[in-house]
Image (spheres, helix red, strand yellow):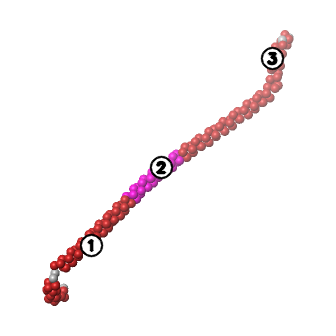
Amino acid sequence: MEFFAEPRNWVFLAFVVFFVLFGKMLWVAIRDILDRRAALVRAELDEAERLRREAEAMLADAKQRRQAAIADAQRLLEGAKHEAERLTAAAAAEAEAAAKRREQMALDRIAAAEKAAVDQVRLTAAQIATAASERVIRDGLTPAADAALIDRAISGLPAALSGRRAA
């Protein structure tokens, strides 16, 4: 009986009875709580995995779009370079053509000025020659010399006309 007189033994017996009577229920409750917690953790892990896959897919898509954008930018730059080269060549050709046109216009003006100068020189020379001839004829020919010159021209007229008919 000494066993029941000890308070520690009563605590031990109460503890054993408590766990025998309520242990299964307590164990089931603790197990259910832990199972729910495990399921919640598992669901969070699954959600985290799904989010990670989505993030990786978004990252791959972003990388692909970035590469496409870089390729587009390079194509645009190359197109702009080609267009700039084409415009530069066109501007150079246009400038060269304009210079040739101006040069040709200057040459035409020079040629026209030369022709006008030559025509003016010829006209002036003809006027001087006419004036000189008139003075020589007026001063050098007498009425008797005029009559002899006219008679010679008249006598040579039939020969000159016959030569013309044969031609």
Q: Nearer the viewer, residue 116 or 35?
A: 116
Q: Nearer the viewer, residue 61 or 70?
A: 70
Q: Which residue bears the numbered disc 1?
A: 123
Q: Residue sitting at 78 percent across and 30 percent down? A: 29
* Labelled disc at residue 12: 3
Local SS, label 2 = helix
Q: Amino acid at mark 3?
A: Phe
Q: Which residue bears the numbered disc 2?
A: 77
What segment is highlighted magenta in the picture? 67-96
Q: Residue sitting at 55 percent across and 46 percent down? A: 65
Q: Give the position of the C terminus as an image quadrant.
A: bottom left
Please report whichever mark, 3 or 2, sits nearer to the chain's N-terminal start.
Answer: 3
Q: Nearer the viewer, mark 3 or mark 1?
A: 1
The image quadrant that residue 159 belongs to is bottom left
Q: Amino acid at mark 1?
A: Leu
Q: Nearer the viewer, mark 3 or mark 2?
A: 2
Q: Residue sitting at 21 percent across and 74 percent down? A: 132
Q: Is residue 52 magenta?
A: no
